Image: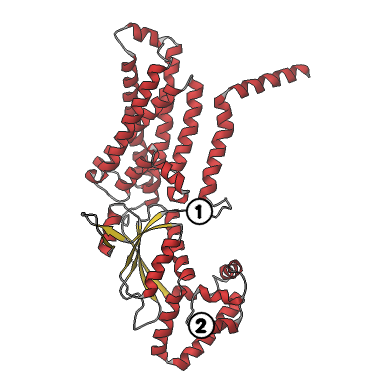
Amino acid sequence: MSQILILLRKSLLVFSRSRTAVSLTFLVPIAIIYVFGHVFGLYKKSDAGPTGIPLAVVNASTDPAAGRLVDALKAEKTFRVIDSFRNRDGSTRPLTESDARRGMNDDDYRFALILPPDLLPKDSFGIRLKFLTNPRNEIESQTVNGMVQKTIFSHVPELLGESMRGAMSRYIGAPALEGFNGELAGVYSKYFNLDRDKILKRLNRADYGLGALSASGGTASEDQDQAKKSAGSVDVFSKIVKIDTEQVAGKELSNPMAARTVGGYAVMFLLFAVSNSAATLFEEKNTGIFVRLLSAPVRPAHIIWARFLFGMMLGIVQIAALFLAGHFLFHLDIFSHAAALLAVGVAAAAACSAFGLLIASVSPNSAAASGLATFVVITMSAVGGAWFPVSLMPDYIQRVSKLTIVYWSVEGFSDVLWAGHTLVQVLPKIGILVGITAAVMAVSVACFRRGKLFD
């Protein structure tokens, strides 16, 4: 028994002294749980959930209620409303539908809500809206759609009330309108378990929509729970508010999901590959290869840059193989955009190769490099958009994501495969990846000079 305890103590000591083992056992799972907690709303904080999703809003209506709808959208933390256009001279003007479409084609934002001049039609009752989408990610699209509808129904019930009361009064007459209100109050009472008389009073004051539900005297959360339970039984609101949805980009794709996801996973696995490749520098040192190389007319800088070019070539081949697999397995169209896709792939491969050298330059040994690479790659993939849209995470994580290789690589691949952007159009993102490569390589070279790898 004593021998078993001695061996157990030995195993515990070896594990505790291995930073790699400890980080892979504790830090990586905690980091992933933290990120997934934000994505799936597991936190009870008031600021949990998606924030700051860009939403273009074009208000072409002169009705005062339209302005209140825009204000309600601005107050919703899920959105960052863009309702003005900045001219070249620095002045601003209200956004137009043509501005919104151009902005979506330039990927300034992916969603736009149009409030047309006939927001409240004179010849019929209800509301007419237009919703433009560029749904690169289904989760983000469903979130935005749901929050836009929630804002319309929950925050601006007077839109429904004024529209219905005015139009129906003209269409069927005041007596029939009172009868309609009575019938509608009965529907509310039956399916939402509310006080019929209070609802009827609110309806006669033209307070339609979810605002009428709060007349029951219960709390807002209780009323919303009742509404959710009865959503499948009555569909009043969708018949009153007509939202015409138009997909701006990606309509011709045979497999939209593949266009969204293949690029993200390609970058993640590329980071793993080049990081492991760079970690072999420690094996070359331990086996004496460095001694023989440095005895020849070879300097450490030659070894570093040769390793960078090797990682870059490996990355290009791996990206090509993964996209070819996407083409044959998921019918992903890669040949129509070959030049732009190749340019983004080369830039991403260079940035990933530089990242692998950075990991090797700051690590004391091969095991530490492997552990650090695993932790950083998984975290960077999670916050950079390889797995799910960054808009589902808090503001500070969204800002951090823009510092990662994964974010700009995924954006570049999405621009090409989803939006069909040309090489010229993706040059800004390629330039950012090249800039990241230069900065990371500069740090890596400096760390190698101060380190002991080439001693």
Res 389 visible: no
Label 2, secondary structure: give it.
helix
- Specify the amino acid type for callout 2: Leu
- In the rendered view of the protein, which quadrant contains the C terminus? top left
Residue 62 x %, y %: 32, 74
Residue 354 x %, y %: 36, 28
Query: What's the residue at 38%, 37% (across, down)?
Result: 405
**Relative to 399, residue 204 above or below:** below
Q: Which residue is mark 1?
A: 49
Query: What's the residue at 40%, 38% (across, down)?
Result: 404
Query: What's the residue at 23%, 57% (across, down)?
Result: 87
For the residues bearing labels 2 and 1, Cβ distance under 8 angstroms: no
Res 189 visible: yes
Give the left or right position of residue 306, taking residue 11 as reference: left
The Cα atoms of the two marked residues, 2 and 1, are separated by 34 Å
Name the one closer to the observer, 278 or 53.
Answer: 53
Q: Which residue is mark 2?
A: 203
Mark 1: give few (<14), some (14-19) or many (20+) Cα within 10 Å.
Answer: many
Residue 230, image quadrant: bottom right
Give the left or right position of residue 96, taking residue 270 as reference: left
Residue 66 x %, y %: 37, 71
**Relative to 278, residue 108 above or below:** below
Query: What's the residue at 32%, 12% (across, down)?
Result: 299
Name the one closer to the observer, 219 or 33.
Answer: 219
